[in-house]
Amino acid sequence: MIPDIISAVLILLGGVLSLAAALGLLRFGDLLSRMHASAKPQVLGLLLVAVAIGIQFPTWATVTTLAIVISFQLVTIPVATHMVGRAGYRTKHLRRSMLYRDELAEAVDRAEARELAWERKRGIGTDHHDG
Amino acid sequence: MSSLVFDILVVAGSVLLGTSAIIALYRIVRGPSILDRMIATDVVLASIMCGLGGFMALSHRTDLLPVLIVLAMLGFVGSVSVSRYVSKSDSMTPGAEVGALSDFSSSDWHMPKDAEDDSTDAETAAESEWFEDVARGISDVADGPEAVTVRDEAEDGHSEAEDGHDAPEVGLDVGSDPDVDGEGEGTGPDPGPEDSDDSSRTGPEPDQTDLDPGAEGKRP
Amino acid sequence: MSSNSQEPNSQKANSQRPGVSRTTGRRPVKNRQSKGRGFVQQLVLVFFLVLLWVMLWDSVSVLSVLSGVVLALLVTRVFYLPPVVLSGRFNIIHAVIFGAWFLYSLMHASVEVAWFAFRRRAVGAGSVIACDLRTSSDLLMTLVADTASLIPGSIIIDSDRALGVLYLHVLDCDSEEKIFSGKAQVYHIEELLIRAVGSHRDLAALRATPDPMGLKGGERR
C-alpha cells in the first residue's frame, strides 16, 4: 500500500503544478510571462509523474521508457518555449510594454543601423543579378 | 484507513488536473493571439499526460507508455509549427502596428512596404506575391522568391553563400545579428537548408537567381 | 588545428606536392584527424540511436538491435546533421554536480513560479536581459540556453552567435537586483557546464573572467 500512497502523493503534486500552470496562464498579463507559467511546471510535473510510475513498476523496461519520455521532454520543451518566445517577442503587437528593461531591443537598434548600411552596399550588387 | 487516504489523494489529484485543463480552456477561448492559444493547448496536453501517467501508476498498467511519448512529441511539433507560422505570417508586415493575428485577412498583408529600406522593388513585389498566396491558404511555398528553392541543394553551398550566417549548427537560431530587420521583417525560424522563411532576409544573395523557372514567371 | 576544413586549393598549389604543408613538408595531420573525428561522431550518433530504439522496444534481441542499426544508419544519412564539435572532455564529478544543482534549481524555481500563480499580486513586469557568455563554442551555448530555459524563471529568446551573447526573458524582474540575480544564475550555469564539458579554451576563458558580474559591475552586454 505504501508505494501506492507515495504514487498518489506524487500525482497530487503533479496536479498542483498543473493547476499552477493553468492559473498562471489565467492571471499573468503578458504573453511571455504566460509562457513561463505554462511550460516550466510541466517539466517538474512530468518528472514527478514519471517517478510515480517508476515506483509502481521498477522494471528495466518501464524505467528506460520513462527515461526516454523525460529526456524527450527535457530536450524539446526548451526548444518549443524558445520558438514561441521568439515569435512572441518579434511580432511587435504581441509585446506589451510590460518589460522593465529590454536589452535585446538595444542590441537590435545597434545592429539595425549596421545592417542597413550593409544591405545598401549589397543592394547595388543585387540589381545586377535580379536582371 | 490507508485506503481512504489513498482514495482522497487520487480524487484530489484528478480534480486538480481536470481543473487545470478547464482553466486552460478559458485561455484558449480568450487568448488574444494564436500563441496564447498554443501555450494553453500545451498546458491541456500536459494535464492529459499527467492524468494518463497517474492512471497508469494507479491501475498498474504500462501499456499506455508509448502514448505518453507520442503525446510529448505531438505537443512539441504543434508548438514549433505554430510558432514558425506566426513568425512567417508576421514577417510580412512592416512597422509596429499590426492587426491581431487571430483574423487572417489578406488585406492586412498588403500594407505598402516602404521601399526605402533594404530591399529592391523586384524583391518586394516577389515577396508580396508570395504572401498573397499564403494568405489565400496555399501552403505550397515552392513558388516563392527564388531563394526558397535553392535551399534544396547542397547545404554546403548554402553555408558558404550566407554572409551573415555561420554554418548550420545544433540547436538555437544563430542569426549573426539578433532580429536585424527592425521593421518587423523577422528572420523567422532557423536558417536551415530547407527553411523557406529565410527568403525575406536573403533576397539580396547573388547566387540564388533564376534557378526556378516557376518563380521567374511570377516576377514582374 | 581544431578546424575541420580541408586545405584550400591555393595552398596546395603553392606547395611542392599536393596536400603538403609548406613549412614542415609533412602531410598535415588535421585532415586525418577531421575525418576520424567525423566518423567517430557518426558512430556515436548511431550508437545512441540504436540504444534509443532498443529502449523503446524494451527488449535486447538480435532483431531489435539489427533493425535499430539499419534505421539509425538510414536516419543519419537522410537527416544529415552537421557535425558538432565536441570538446572531448567530460568531467564526471562536475557533471554530477551540475545534475544535482539542476534538479535542485528546477524544484526550487518551479515552486517559486507556482507560488507566483497562486499569490495575490501575480507577477510584475519582466525583462529581457543580455548575457555575454565567456564561452564561444556552439554546443556549450546551446547547453547553457537549454538549461536556462528549463529552469523556471528564464526563457531564451534570442542569441547572437557571433558575439556569444544570449538574450533571455526573465519573469518578474522589475528591479536591478532581480536583473542582477538573473544574470548571475546564467553565468553560474555556464560555469558549471564549462567545468563539466567545456573545452580547454573555455576553461581558460572561465579562469580569465571568473566573476563577470562582480568585476564588470553590472555590465549591460
Image: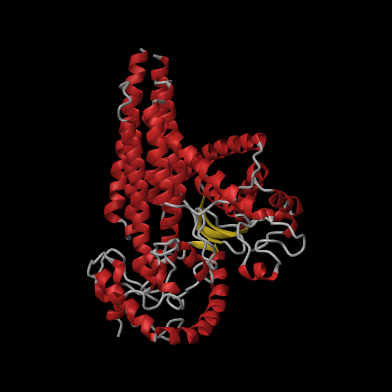
Q: In this view, does C198 lie above or below C1?
A: above
* Quadrant showing the N terminus of chain B: top left
Q: Where is residue C36 in the image (x, y as percent from the top left)?
A: 59, 47
* Quadrant showing the C terminus of chain B: bottom left
Q: In this view, does B167 lie to the left or right of B106?
A: right
Residue C17 quadrant:
bottom right
Q: Do we see residue B18 in this rendering? A: yes
Q: Do we see residue A49 in this rendering? A: no
Colour scheme in use: secondary structure
Q: Position of residue C74 (x, y in %)?
A: 39, 45
Residue visible at 29% across and 71% down in the picture: B143
Residue A60 quadrant:
top left
Q: Which residue lies furthest to the top in this view?
A: B1
The front one of B31 and B198 is: B198
Q: Residue furthest front?
A: C17
Q: In this view, does A37 lie to the left or right of B21?
A: right
Q: Where is residue C1 in the image (x, y as percent from the top left)?
A: 69, 56
The front one of C130 and B28 is: C130
Q: Is residue A129 above or below residue A28?
A: below
The front one of A24 and B147 is: B147
Residue visible at 54% across and 77% down in the picture: A115
The mark tally for this picture is 0
Q: Where is residue B197 in the image (x, y as percent from the top left)?
A: 38, 67
